[in-house]
Image (cartoon, rainbow, N blue to C red):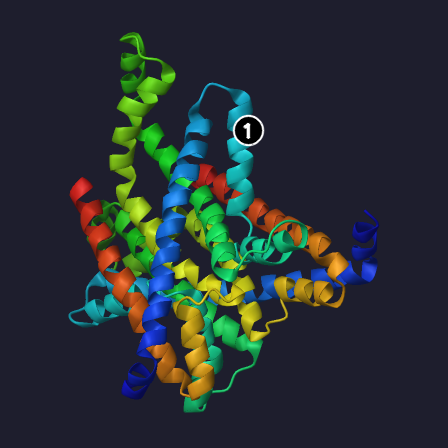
Amino acid sequence: MQNFINAYSWVDLRYLLEGLWITIEVSVISIVFSYILGAILGLIRYIKVKYLSAIVGFIIDLIRNLPLLLIIFFTYFGLPNIGIRLNPIWSSILAMSIFESAMLAEIIRSGIGAVDSGQMEGARANGLTYWQAMWHIVLPQAQKKMIPTIVSQFISLIKDTSLATIIVLPDLMYHAQIIYGQNSNYILPMFLALAVMYFVVCYLLSILSHYLEKRLA
Amino acid sequence: MISIIANHWQDLLYGLGQTLLCSILALFFSLIIGSFFAIFEVVPSKTLRVIARIYIEVFRNIPLLVITMFFYVVIPMFFVKVNGFTAGTIGLTIYTSAFIAETVRSGIQSVDSGQMEGSRANGMTFTQAMRYIVLPQAFRIVIPPLGNQFINLVKNSSVLAFVAGFDLMYQGNTIASTSFDTLNAYFVVGVLYLIITMPLSYYMRYLEKRLD
């Protein structure tokens, strides 16, 4: 019991919260990048450009079927071999963005596909060009359908960020490891803190996702 | 790249074997545990429903790495020594079982409720109706999502690299750091992962289309 009281001193808690902040920061930046990249890739997949869409689709499938950990290793240890050197934060962001944009591309493609085709036809009949109709009519409706799914992708992204501790990203997991590495009495309290912190963040987001699903439906 | 395959093919094959073994074991156990919790979620007893809900929500929202490290670091302190492979497989099983429980539950709920009512009206107990009527139909619906869970399992099993589980990722990382040829080492490992996951994911997509 004393271990728990000592372990949750203000200094240690603040150190953990700093780690949590890095976790959230990396996840937010990655989801923004992947949303932009995923939207572009998803659109290319959707509009079926000859060859290009097939190639993009194949690359998306490749990335989706690789472990994220491999992509993290690749961006941190592999890229320096061809002269690209990134610090742990940016390599994690790059790895997460590559992996997550492939996931989001599929979600966005099926989201656009789920919009009733009458919307596009109606917009075109009213004199909008294809891209105007896409931008003003189809995409906003698709976005509404996709948001809950994107929030749950964001949850898995937050959980996956913990993998980047292996390239010394100073996130929540890594900070907890540092604290219990210094004092083995703190191992159990630190794991409890890790579980609680990740759970609270992810669970709140999953409630948000359910709420959005109900509201936007 | 050829030199990496030539020099390390035994390590790579061993890693591939460990990855597959761990994924299959974890799939087997998480199917059993997951199905139990899925059934708990649809039984009339409120206590069981609450227990299942808590289990699923807790383990879905904690990173796999935290669960795995818990078994690797904390359990040996109080109970028995566990090696990396065992810790990794237990972690994967618990994490995946929460997702499988959700999948199977939605499968059970998508079976028409008349099936259950009909079997109960014909004199079957709840357990019998579940076992012989509802579950077989539910499992047919959930085969594609379960396949996708298995693909996730294979990918997630790379977490064994954290706990010295000698899986494919661990071996690849060792090869990368000893040969200094990181790009090619990761490339080879990536291809090996794709050999397992790609055919599966195309097959699942085919099954999904056929079920529609």
Q: Nearer the viewer, residue A47 or A137?
A: A47
Q: Nearer the viewer, residue B110 or A32?
A: B110
State which quarter of the image contains the C terminus of chain A: top left
Q: Hey, which quadrant is residue A104 in on the image?
A: bottom left
**Residue A192 versus residue A37 in the image, above or below:** above
Residue highlighted by disc 1: B50
Number of marks in picture: 1
* Picture coordinates of residue A87, whole percent (x, y): 56, 81
Residue at screen point 56% across, 43% down: B58
**Residue B63 versus residue B38 in the image, above or below:** below
Q: Is residue B119 left or right of residue A171?
A: left
Q: Nearer the viewer, residue A35 or B129?
A: B129
Q: Is residue A49 left or right of residue B102?
A: left
Residue at screen point 28% across, 62% down: B196
Most distant residue in the bottom direction: A83
* Picture coordinates of residue B153, whole percent (x, y): 39, 54
Residue at screen point 52% across, 26% down: B48
**Residue B128 versus residue B67 in the image, above or below:** above
**Residue A17 versus residue A98 in the image, above or below:** above
Most distant residue in the front direction: B80
Q: Secondary structure at mark 1?
A: helix
**Would you call the spot at circle 1 few (<14 residues within 10 Å), some (14-19), or many (20 or more)?**
few
**Residue B92 visible to an observer of this rendering:** yes
Q: Nearer the viewer, residue B211 or B85?
A: B85
* Picture coordinates of residue B147, whole percent (x, y): 29, 49
Q: Hey, which quadrant is residue B32 in on the image?
A: top left
Chain where mark 1 sits: B
**Residue A40 visible to an observer of this rendering:** no
Q: Hey, which quadrant is residue B20 in on the image?
A: bottom left
Disc 1 residue type (three-letter): Val
